Image (cartoon, helix red, strand yellow):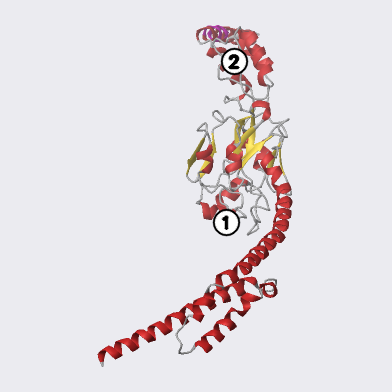
C-alpha cells in the first residue's frame, strides 16, 4: 500500500509542476491575434486560390487587418461585394477596383498554325516545353496539353478541340491567376475586363522576326510598328519584335486593330463596325461608272466621225489655191505638171465618197499632195537658176 501511495503522490506532484510551467510559458510567450482576423476570414469565400497574392484566405484576412487600408487589395473570387463586407468589419472604406479576367494571348489555331509533328508523350505543358519545342513551327505558342485546365478550380477554362487552344469562360473566371501560373510559356495574362466588358489586346507572344513569325503562324505579330504609330494615346509599345497594349492607357479606339496587317490585335465584345458611306457607295458607283463609260464610247465615235468629216470638207479649200501655182510653171513641162496636179487633187474633188470610209487617212493624202505640188513648183525655179549661172560662166 505504501508503494502505491508513494507512486500516486509522485505522479500528482509531477503533473502539478508541469501544469504550472506550461501556464507560465503560455502567458510568457503568448501571441496576440486580432479577433477581427477571424471575422474577416468568415466573410471570405475560403477558395484559398492565392489570386489575392497571399497564402490562402486567412493570410489575406490578416493582411487586410494589419494594413489599415484596403487600397490595392481585392479578393478575385468574391469581388467587390466581398470587399465591402470586409470594409464594414474593419471600419474602412472599400476602394473601387476594376474586375479582371484571364486572357489567352495566342491565336495559333490549326488553321493559322499548321502542325508539323505529333507529340507522343506525357500530356503536360511543363514537360513538353522542357523536352520538346511543340507540334508547330512556333516555339512561343500554346502547347495545348491543358495544364491551365487542371489548375483552374472554378471550371472556367477548357481546350477547344477544333482550335486546340484554351478558351476562358468569363462568367466563371475569377482572375485568380492559377492558369497564368500554370502556363510555362506565359501565354495567359490577367487583364482588366474594361468598360462594358470590352478590351483590346495583342493576341500573340511570338518574339521572332517578321518573316520567321509569319512563316510559323499566319496571324503572328511581325513587329512592323504600324499600331505604335497610329495609337494616339501611346498605349502600345514594341519590344523584341512584339507589340504590347497597356490596358491602363488604352482607350479602346480600335485604330490599331484596323491598322494591323496580320489581324493579331483583337477587340473583344465590341459591336460590329458600321460601313462607311464612302465604302457603301463604291459598289453602287461602279455599275454607274461602267454605264457611263459604255454610253461615252458611241459619243466619242460620233465626235471622231464629225471631226473627220470637217477635215475632209475643209481639205478642198486648202488644195484649191495650189492649182494656179501649177499653171504658172515654166514652159518646159506644163502638160506633165498639170496632169500630176489634176491627178493628185482628184481625191479632194470627191470628199463625200472618202469621208465615211477613212476620213483621217484621206486628209493625210491630201496634205501630202499639196506638199508635192510645192516641191514641183520649186523644182523649175531651181533649174532656171542653174541655167543662168552656167550662161554667166561661159
Q: Is residue 308 above or below residue 365?
A: above
The residue singled out by tag 2 in the image is 95
Residue positioned 48% across, 80% down in the render = 328
Q: Which residues are magenta?
A: 19-24
Residue 218 location (% of width, % of height): 61, 52
Residue 230 location (% of width, % of height): 53, 38
Residue positioned 64% across, 76% down in the render = 349
- Residue lying furthest left: 393
The residue singled out by tag 1 in the image is 215
Residue 135 location (% of width, % of height): 62, 55
Q: Is residue 371 left or right of residue 193?
A: left
- Exactly how many numbered labels are in the figure? 2
**Mark 2, other Cα within 10 Å: few <14 / some 14–19 / many ≥20:** some
Helix, strand or loop status at disc 1:
helix
Rounded to the nearest whole Å, what is the CA distance between mark 1 and mark 2?
47 Å
Magenta segment: does it hold 209?
A: no
Q: Is residue 353 above or below residue 197?
A: below
For the C terminus, give its image quadrant: bottom left
Residue 390 location (% of width, % of height): 30, 90
Amino acid at each position: 500500500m505504501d508503494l502505491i501511495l508513494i507512486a500516486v503522490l509522485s505522479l500528482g506532484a509531477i503533473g502539478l509542476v508541469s501544469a504550472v510551467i506550461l501556464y507560465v510559458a503560455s502567458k510568457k510567450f503568448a501571441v496576440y491575434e486580432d479577433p477581427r482576423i477571424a471575422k474577416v476570414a468568415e466573410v471570405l469565400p475560403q477558395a484559398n486560390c492565392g489570386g489575392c497574392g497571399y497564402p490562402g484566405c486567412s493570410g489575406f484576412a490578416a493582411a487586410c487587418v494589419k494594413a489599415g487600408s484596403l487600397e490595392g487589395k481585392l479578393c478575385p473570387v468574391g469581388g467587390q461585394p466581398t470587399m465591402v463586407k470586409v470594409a464594414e468589419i474593419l471600419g474602412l472604406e472599400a476602394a473601387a477596383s476594376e474586375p479582371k479576367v484571364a486572357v489567352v494571348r495566342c491565336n495559333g489555331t490549326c488553321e493559322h498554325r499548321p502542325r508539323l509533328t505529333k507529340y507522343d508523350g506525357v500530356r503536360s505543358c511543363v514537360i513538353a516545353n522542357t523536352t520538346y519545342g511543340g507540334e508547330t513551327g512556333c516555339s512561343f505558342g500554346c502547347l495545348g496539353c491543358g495544364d491551365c485546365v487542371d489548375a483552374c478550380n472554378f471550371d472556367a477554362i477548357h481546350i477547344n478541340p477544333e482550335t486546340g487552344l484554351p478558351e476562358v469562360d468569363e462568367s466563371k473566371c475569377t482572375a485568380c491567376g492559377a492558369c497564368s501560373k500554370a502556363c510555362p510559356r506565359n501565354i495567359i495574362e490577367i487583364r482588366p475586363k474594361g468598360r462594358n466588358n470590352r478590351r483590346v489586346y495583342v493576341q500573340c507572344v511570338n518574339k521572332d522576326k517578321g518573316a520567321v513569325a509569319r512563316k510559323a503562324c499566319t496571324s503572328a505579330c511581325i513587329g512592323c510598328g504600324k499600331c505604335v504609330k497610329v495609337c494616339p494615346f501611346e498605349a502600345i509599345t514594341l519590344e523584341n519584335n512584339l507589340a504590347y497594349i497597356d490596358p491602363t492607357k488604352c482607350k479602346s479606339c480600335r485604330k490599331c486593330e484596323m491598322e494591323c496587317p496580320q489581324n493579331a490585335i483583337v477587340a473583344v465584345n465590341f459591336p460590329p463596325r458600321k460601313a462607311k458611306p464612302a465604302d457603301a457607295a463604291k459598289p453602287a458607283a461602279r455599275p454607274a461608272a461602267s454605264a457611263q463609260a459604255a454610253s461615252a464610247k458611241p459619243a466619242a465615235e460620233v465626235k471622231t466621225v464629225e471631226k473627220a468629216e470637217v477635215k475632209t470638207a475643209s481639205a478642198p479649200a486648202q488644195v484649191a489655191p495650189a492649182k494656179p501655182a501649177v499653171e504658172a510653171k515654166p514652159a518646159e513641162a506644163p502638160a506633165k505638171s498639170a496632169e500630176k496636179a489634176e491627178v493628185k487633187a482628184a481625191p479632194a474633188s470627191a470628199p463625200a465618197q472618202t469621208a465615211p470610209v477613212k476620213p483621217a487617212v484621206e486628209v493625210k493624202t491630201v496634205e501630202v499632195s499639196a506638199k508635192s505640188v510645192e516641191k514641183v513648183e520649186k523644182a523649175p525655179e531651181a533649174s532656171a537658176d542653174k541655167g543662168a549661172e552656167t550662161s554667166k560662166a561661159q
